[in-house]
Amino acid sequence: MQRASRLKRELSLLSTEPPPGITCWQSGSRLDDLRAQILGAADTPYEKGIFNLEIVVPERYPFEPPKIRFLTPIYHPNIDSAGRICLDVLKLPPKGAWRPSLNISTLLTSIQLLMAEPNPDDPLMADISSEYKYNKQLFLINAKEWTEKYASQQKRASKALEEKTNQSETSTTSESIMLKRKGSDITKKEKKSRLES
């Protein structure tokens, strides 16, 4: 009961006063299954990207932290290919820094800060971490490419438009095929009736 009332309060606060560049909402009817979007901050390789996240709230929340992962691929030393995030506030003590006084809004803000300021000394992706440390220019190029490829608003809009166009083309093509078939059926019937008479 405490978890449900707290989650409702947090979601209400997230919808009325969201942190800048962050949105969070309930996915479907389940209160413990949430989705969030983080906008890539200016002057970072993630600028203009929209990153989707999945938030699973455990039964013991707020005494246990939510499980958060990226659904959008991101090139980052602290986020692996499955979207898992290496961040102390997402773990219980002694290794982590989660406290029941923290909330989902705080976690999403912390993730947004981690995107802007990676921690290469505590990586999930060792190769990206060493690239960040020793060849930052290459890291920035790769991170920008990934953002454009997977998190770009323009790409998403053009994909949606492309899908709609393909669907309408497919329906138009199938309609014309049906008309042709009907027409050919009519002509066959007409031919038969002409032959019989």
Image (cartoon, rainbow, N blue to C red):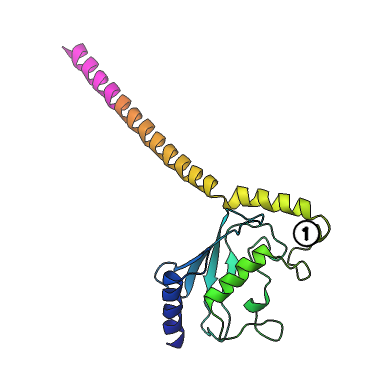
Q: Can residue 120 be seen in this snapshot? A: yes
Image x and y of residue 144, in percent:
67, 51
Q: Is residue 89 above or below residue 48?
A: below
Q: Is residue 192 above or below residue 142?
A: above
Q: Give the dominant element type of the magenta stretch: helix, strand or loop.
A: helix
Image x and y of residue 70, in percent:
59, 63
Q: Is 188 within the magenta?
A: yes
Image x and y of residue 11, in percent:
44, 74
User: Seen from this angle, which residue lies furthest right?
Assistant: 134
Please state, as top left, top right, bottom left or bottom right, where the N terminus lies in the image: bottom left
- Return the residue at label 1: 132
Q: Callout 1, which amino acid?
A: Tyr
Which residue sits at x=42%, y=80%? 9
Q: Can residue 31 be seen in this snapshot? A: no
Which residue is at the front of the view, 17 or 191? 17
Which residue sits at x=65%, y=69%? 85
Lateral position of residue 190 relative to residue 126, left or right: left
Image x and y of residue 8, in percent:
41, 78
Which residue sits at x=77%, y=66%? 120
Q: Would you identify the image quadrant in which residue 17 lies?
A: bottom left
Question: Which portion, as a residue range, is magenta?
Answer: 182-197
Figure label count: 1
User: Seen from this angle, which residue lies furthest left?
Assistant: 197
Which residue sits at x=43%, y=82%? 4
Please state, as top left, top right, bottom left or bottom right, where the C terminus lies in the image: top left
Which residue is at the front of the view, 150 or 136? 136
